[in-house]
Image: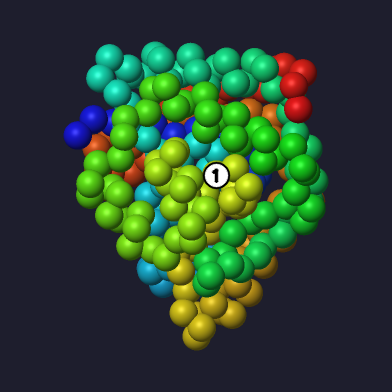
Amino acid sequence: MAERYAIYYAPPATGALWERASQWLGRDAETGETFEGPVAGMERDRLLNFTGSPNRYGFHATLRSPVSLKPGFGRDEFDAVTSDIASAYRPLHLGPMKIAEFDGFLALVPVEAPAELENFAQACVEAVEPLRAPLTERELGRRLANPLDERQRELLDRYGYPYVAEQFFFHMTLTDQLDAEALPEIREVAEAWFAPVLDDLTLGSISVFVEPKPAQEFRRARDFALTGSAQ
């Protein structure tokens, strides 16, 4: 199977949030560097038990979930679409962030998300649609393994992903789904670790992440600064 491509928001790779998040997950998705040693007093091996999926995907917020491309389309076309979006839209001020829990997952989310976020994310989704290959039966089955309501199933059929349009929720995942016993402990560690870098955030660029082959680690391949005027 060919590569898969995604449009994500990832904070600047030279910034403190990216550095802390990469250390938390145990891998820098841009450089490929891995990290040893404890995090906020928790042993690395124990923390890795709770961060397997976000470690593989790299630290990010999804704007256009990973897609396979139709025959005839590849890296250049996906980059061109992403560049067009970046050149059309202006940076979005997200403001202060917080650690939140939903369905047992921990994530960084804006304290008050700007209304423009949903429209921007949907613009990313729509821009990729001409390039996107349909879901395979296996991919569709994997999506349907999780309960979806009628609207989410409609969006899955239309866009290959159920959490778009009004179902979109900006979040930067920190953990796998945690059980009730582990959740308070991991949240306490996460609060301590990320506290110094939650003051303010601006979505000033978007990034192409690439999965070379199924189940391999995603890499942060290219960044595109937002330089336009659209909201």
Residue 143 in picture, x, y percent from top left: 35, 54
Residue 115 drawn above or below residue 222: below
- Total marks shown come to 1
Residue 211 appears in view? yes
Kind of residue sitting beneath label 1: Val
Identify the image quadrant of the N terminus: top left
Give the residue drawn at x 60%, y 29%: 123
Give the residue drawn at x 30%, y 40%: 135
Report the side of 138 relative to 49 (left or right).
left
Give the residue drawn at x 59%, y 42%: 165
Residue 55 in picture, x, y percent from top left: 42, 53
Residue 198 appears in view? no
Q: What is the quadrant of residue 134 in the picture?
A: top left
Please identify the residue farthest to the bottom as the structure is shown: 181
Q: 126 or 188, which is in the foreground?
A: 126
Per the image, the residue denoted by label 1 is: 164
Q: Is mark 1 on a helix, strand or loop?
A: loop
Q: How crowded is mark 1: few (under 14 residues within 10 Å), some or many (20 or more)?
A: many
